[in-house]
Amino acid sequence: MSFTLGRWVRTEVSGASHSDRIEVTVSGLPEGETIDMDEIRAFLKRRQGGNAVYTTARKEADEPFIKSGVRDEGGTAVLTGEPLVAYFVNSNAKSSDYKKMRTIPRPSHADYVAYVKYKGRLDMAGGGFFSGRMTLPMCFAGAVCMQILKKRGIDIRAHILSVGDVEDEKFDPVKSDMEAYADHVLPVLSKKAGDEMTALMESVSREGDSVGGKIECKVTGLGAGLGDPIYDSLESAISYGIFGIPAIKGIEFGEGFNVCRDRGSSSNDGFCIRDGKVSCITNNSGGIQGGITNGMPVMFSVAVKPTPSIYKKQRSVDLETMKECELTIEGRHDSCIVPRVVPCVEAMTALVLTDVVAGDAEGSRDETEGFA
């Protein structure tokens, strides 16, 4: 089974957490574009999460093997215009850890709904294709697209906004440049917040529990006029992609649900002239109005739920005997996936924006048109 995102730049992923390999195919990328493979490998390392106690003990090389779509020109990787196809080997899976969960679903995981929908035919070891492992090919494709967008002046960055009740500083919603990460192992703006988050995640891990959080993303360089109204709004496109990341439970643009308490006089983004261009005094809309960018930074935040695989006893049912039971989960799991989701949010945003920019090129809506 495979899954596809995009219309003009299409990304298809296939495989599962414990299959021999997982694969990604990206079609519609511009021919002749140079790609820095070392930069892509560094991006994929961010998704791995390092060796922290709150990160899964499963370690994979995550080395991309490219089958097509790239040629070597004097040591430089160049896109050929053909579909870019890459795969990753799964070499450190332990399917035996998931034997009991073939009939006893983990609470808040996809085990039960997958059992119902696919009539028990799926191998759900490691979460099957519902697993966060599937974000690896997404991140590879997104890392390629981030390089393409950056050459066109579009930058994407995300950071941990909160873990549990520990909050980081926010991005500046008006500045057109990116704030720097603090000198910390976590992608945060405040070192103090990063230290407190680390302490909380380590504490939760020792308890055999898990914790969720929020991630904030900022996109600069889009300019005004990108996107479409109604069903093809940029908010719709970004949300559609973001919810393809496992464990995402919510998204809000700009001030999001906070505007519910505001009045129009304080919520509206008044216009001004800045550096000779039309701009906004504030950015409560998150850079999008009517589904179309207004030239301000595109700002949104996402909610990441606590990892459902925890080591504490939980109530479940045996689907064979139809009796209630207790479940103690084995295997290797993150107590907090928020740090590892940060690059996933960046990558997915890049995939969506690359597709939207390609479709918007020269005002064309002809699906045979390529990326400008």
Image (spheres, grey):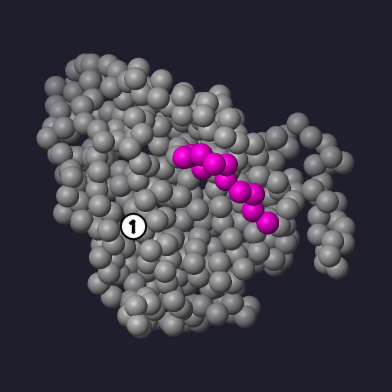
Identify residue for label 1.
137
On screen, residue 146 versus residue 118, left or right, reads right
Q: Please name whichever residue, 266 or 67, is drawn nearer the observer in this view of the structure.
A: 67
Q: Quadrant of residue 210?
A: top left
The residue tagged with tag 1: helix, strand or loop? helix
Percent across and percent down for residue 250 are 53, 39
On screen, residue 99 versus residue 149, left or right, reads left
Magenta residue check for 212: no
Percent across and percent down for residue 224 are 71, 65
Classified by dominant secondary structure, the portion drawn in magenta counts as loop
Residue 194 at least partly seen: yes
Percent across and percent down for residue 112 are 27, 33
Please state the extent of the stretch shown in magenta in the rendering.
177-187
Residue 240 at least partly seen: no
Q: Quadrant of the C terminus?
A: bottom right
Q: Please name whichever residue, 239 or 68, is drawn nearer the observer in this view of the structure.
A: 68
Residue depicted at 34% across the width and 30% down the height: 53
Percent across and percent down for residue 284 are 74, 45
Residue 33 higher or lower than 244, as above or below: below
Residue depicted at 84% across the width and 40% down the height: 266
**Dot 1 surroundings within 10 Å: few (below 14), some, or many (20 or more)?**
many
Residue 265 higher or lower than 162, as above or below: below
Magenta residue check for 182: yes
Q: Please name whichever residue, 347 or 185, is drawn nearer the observer in this view of the structure.
A: 185
Residue depicted at 19% across the width and 40% down the height: 125
Residue 314 higher or lower than 9, as above or below: above
On screen, residue 229 versus residue 314, left or right, reads right
